[in-house]
Image (cartoon, helix red, strand yellow):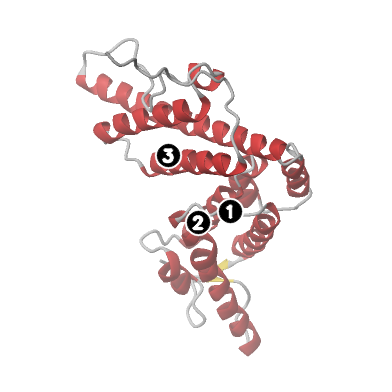
Amino acid sequence: MAKRTPPPTAATPALADSDVDACIARLRSRLEQVEKLSPNDDTERNALSMSIRNAIHDIFGTNSQQWRSSADFSLTQWMFVVPSDPDEYAYAKHEAVTSGMANGKAKLRALIAELEERKAEQTGSPGTARREAADLFDGLTLHARIRDAARELFKDGHYRQAVLDASLAFVNMVKERSRVHDRDGNALMSMVFSRNNPILAVNDLADQSDQDEQEGFMHLAMGVCLALRNPRAHDLDPDEPEHALDCLVLLSMLAKRVQKAQRRAEA
């Protein structure tokens, strides 16, 4: 009988730069799947949990601390006591799934950050670029909504996701201030910041110059959806920290204008 090949035993496998990049991309792909996962899809959630466990095993090895802490990885938090009442059970399951998915995303982000640090160490600059970028972030005076949406992700080195979440925060802010919740993207921005009959006016619209500025702001707001939010929601191409900071500064400037904008019409 042929002997079964034993599983890898290295605690921290030595990976070439290209291998690290592939491992990071694999975990980022799983993270994207979790973020898009419906909490009500039990079958898909269980399958994705297994896929994530396999990815962690393949990347870090059987004897690694990363695998030992992830061998029972699940996107559903265990319920130690299962309520018999249907309503209580439904509530308990909802809490278990919500907690499990949140913990799963945090775990994946931590593992991605660990691999990114390993890559930095292999190039001779362990974490230096991330610390410098974090210091630059702290030196910015960003609008609170943009800062809060991006801070943790940016400091963990997830620059693409930081810009994406900050873009979503800006869009949500426009919806809240305008009270328009049935539109999104260009349709939302063109309606809310219309040159002729805006819901939110960034100035007094007293003359041609004011109207031109209003129209220009509308195009900038549309650009947030087209150039910042949408590309990052559809692919995993990374952002460099400097570019991410530029995006966050732009989002902050726009958010500050939205905060001060006058609401002129009912949605």
Q: Which mark is residue 232?
A: 2
Q: Give the number of the mark in front: 2 or 1.
A: 2
Residue count near mark 1 (Cα–Cα under 10 Å), binned few <14, some 14–19, many ≥20? many
Closest to the observer, 203 or 111:
111
Asked whether residue 153 appears in the rendered view, the answer is yes
Residue name at image x 58 percent, y 68 percent? 262
The single residue placed furthest to the top in the displayed view is 81
Query: What is the CA distance from the residue labelled 3 to the residue labelled 2?
Result: 15 Å
Above/below status of 264 relative to 213: above
Q: Secondary structure at mark 3?
A: helix
Closest to the observer, 82 or 32:
32
Residue count near mark 2 (Cα–Cα under 10 Å), binned few <14, some 14–19, many ≥20? many
Question: What residue is disc 1 on?
Answer: 163
Which amino acid does the dot numbered 1 rest on?
Val
Question: What residue is disc 3 on?
Answer: 30
Residue 20, picture quadrant: top right
